Amino acid sequence: MREALFIKKNAEKWNEYQYLQTEDPDQVADRFITLMDDLSYSKTFYPHSKVTKWINSLAVSIYQTVYKNKKQRYLRLITFWRYELPLLFRKHHTVLFYTFLLFAVFCSIAVFSAMKDDEFVTGVMGREYVQMTEDNIEKGDPFGVYRSDNRFLMFVALALNNIRVGFMMVVGGLLGGVMTLYLLFKNAIMLGSFQYWFFSKGLGWQSVLVIWVHGTLEISGMILECCAGFIIGKSMLFPGTYSRWHSFRKGVKDAMKICITIIPITLMAAFLESHITYLSSNAFDKSRNVSLPPAVSISILVLSLAFIVWYFIVYPIILERRVQKHPELLDKMYVK
């Protein structure tokens, strides 16, 4: 094909690509593919022509547009985790504080009740579970419940169960937070009873070094999930100056953002429980050859707790003060 005919056949299309830009991803992709075909043909038959340089510049322009959008999405993801979520948690620190306070009170009630009634733990945990654990203690393997022949399936089962329970805690906010409160109470009573029972058997600190390797993240995630549920309930019951519907929408939006944060925490807790916790328990079972030294268990526990306290409590406060002192930072924090 002669160059003049090639230009005449495609000039209208190229002008459209240059002056009538689109943000539709499918159209952008189609234009880029078409231009690359035209560029390949032009380079083959008219390598030194101006039309080849023109087509190349159009292709580069579209490529840069695609790259820019990808870069903005990448930066948006960074700002979401680095700035938006911490400031969101700072906004709801009061709800988070009362959620933790309720959890601590419920755990204390369980401990006090277990001290006064020997059958309380059995009633909460179930006779079968208590008997199984007592049998494991007699065998010299008090934390045998964490052993599994297939650790990957154990990880999947734990992750799915924790996500399911967390989802119920958040959705419970739709009932004014009543269901969320019930689930928080139920899990706190179980934890308090469970932990006291091990201390009463002389295995308290061993249980801390074993169970809280994964429990630090798991329980923290549960408290955050209940916090999200209470945010929804609060938005429904106490809309403030907003209409009830507008307040509810804001509450659900904030709760969903919090849920995004909890997913990696839940997965990490499930991984630790399925792959690491049993190694920690081996340190107290002389018949096991492979174990995790207590110092490593303590390090995992401390690092997990430090992350939770820093990211969800300390850092949001620091970030808020920085923004209050320099409001112009908000423009730099968010990618529009």
Image: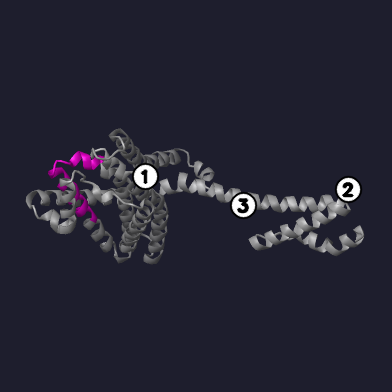
- The N terminus - image quarter: bottom right
Residue nearest the observer in this picture, 99 or 217: 217
Residue nearest the observer in this picture, 264 or 143: 143
Residue at 46% across, 44% down: 82
Residue nearest the observer in this picture, 108 or 229: 108
Left or right, 211 with respect to 155, comes to left
**Residue 276 picture location, percent across and down:** 34, 43
Q: State the extent of the magenta-drawn residues as a range.
A: 187-209
Amino acid type of the residue tagged 1 in the rendering: Phe
**Residue 5 picture location, percent across and down:** 90, 62
Helix, strand or loop at mark 2: loop
| 58 in relation to 30, above or below | above
Task: Give the residue at mark 3.
Answer: 69
Residue at 86% across, 64% down: 9
First in residue order: circle 2 vs circle 1? 2
| Residue 305, picture quadrant | top left
| 332 in relation to 164, above or below | above
Q: CA distance from mark 2 to mark 3?
A: 32 Å
Q: Mark 3 and 1 residues: CB-CB less than 8 Å, in contact?
A: no
| 229 in relation to 208, above or below | below
First in residue order: circle 3 vs circle 1? 3
Amino acid type of the residue tagged 2 in the rendering: His
**Residue 172 picture location, percent across and down:** 31, 63
Task: Give the residue at mark 2.
Answer: 48
How many neighbours does mark 2 have within 10 angstroms: few (below 14), some (14-19), or many (20 or more)? few
- The label shown at residue 312 is 1
